[in-house]
Image (cartoon, rainbow, N blue to C red):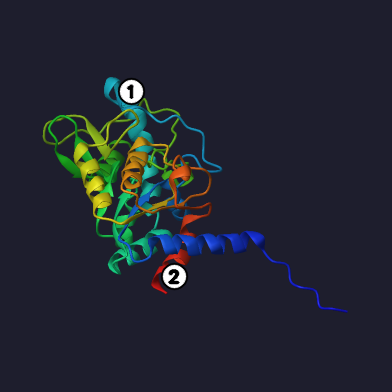
Amino acid sequence: MAPVAPEIDVATAALERELDAAADALRARRVVVLTGAGVSTDSGIPDYRGEGAPKRTPMTIQQFLGDVEFQKRYWAGSHLGWRRFRAAEPNAGHLVLAELEREGFVTGIATQNVDGLHSRAGSGRIVDLHGSMDRVQCLDCGQVYAREDISVTIEGANPWLQRPDAVTIAPDGDAEIEDASRFVLPVCTVCGGRLKPDVVFFGEFIPQQKFREATALVRASDAMLIAGSSLVVNSGIRLVEQARRRKLPIVIVNRGATRADARATVKLDAGTSPTLRALAARLRA
């Protein structure tokens, strides 16, 4: 009897071919990286739109600015989420991107994330398109605070607030809370003004300087790698369009469809951490 040939894993073989094609598209080029929430899911931070993402209606900047009760709800939930958020560690995807930057493959990272994990992983040139949760700014005088300092103030003024170990966090560090009416808001120690985490709320524009910095990264690069973003937010798709107009190779690594799939040179429907590791191995070969 003739030996039975082993079954070929068609999906694995297809992914290997896609990885080879992605490496060919990026090899010997200066690569700008655009990342979204999907690159942080392996660190325990949920995605906005991926499979299993919690249904939520984020607070808008108009709600936050217009009603002190909205400010209380936001700050109470954001504080609970912050402690869990801050405990997250960079995953293999963050680390390999930092390695590729040090090795000269990556020119920099434009990220839609506010978790600060790229910085903690060792990446050097980062544009935080939507800000960073580790900074707090006074809306009235512009004073900037470290988030950790504001957290100490919040805990001192709100000893009743539950511990954060059981809360469900969102990609922006927020958490749901039922009753925030007793919450004592932190205020600016300089002018007594309103404080807000240095992040872009829904309905708020990305600072022009940040977008210019991201545009400069695209212009200084010969290819674009998108990791963990469905590109629903306009900031991302605008950068992709800049790359497309310059005819740069565009590689997308994301579970599920994105708004730029039709513009991609190669699209890999896969998790970011293992895929970026496999892609880096090919670029170094």
* Quadrant in which the N terminus appears: bottom right
Which residue, given by chain and number where applicable, does mark 1 sit on?
63
Where's residue 254, x and y in %?
A: 48, 50
Which residue, given by chain and number where applicable, does mark 2 sit on?
281
Secondary structure at numbered mark 1: helix
| Viewer-nearest residue: 155 or 80 | 80
Where's residue 218, x and y in %?
A: 28, 50
**Looking at numbered disc 1 in the image, what kind of residue is underneath it?**
Gln
**Looking at numbered disc 2 in the image, what kind of residue is underneath it?**
Ala
Side of 51 relative to 79 (left or right): right
Q: Residue furthest top?
A: 66
Give the vertical position of 173 relative to 223 (above or below). Answer: above
**Sequence-earlier tag: 2 or 1:** 1
Where's residue 187, x and y in %?
A: 20, 33
Give the vertical position of 56 relative to 285 (above or below). Answer: above
Instruction: Rate crowding at label 1 as few (under 14), some (14 to 19) or many (20 or more) other CA atoms within 10 Å.
Output: some
Q: Please state which of the two labelled residues, at mark 2 or mark 1, is closer to the viewer.
A: 2
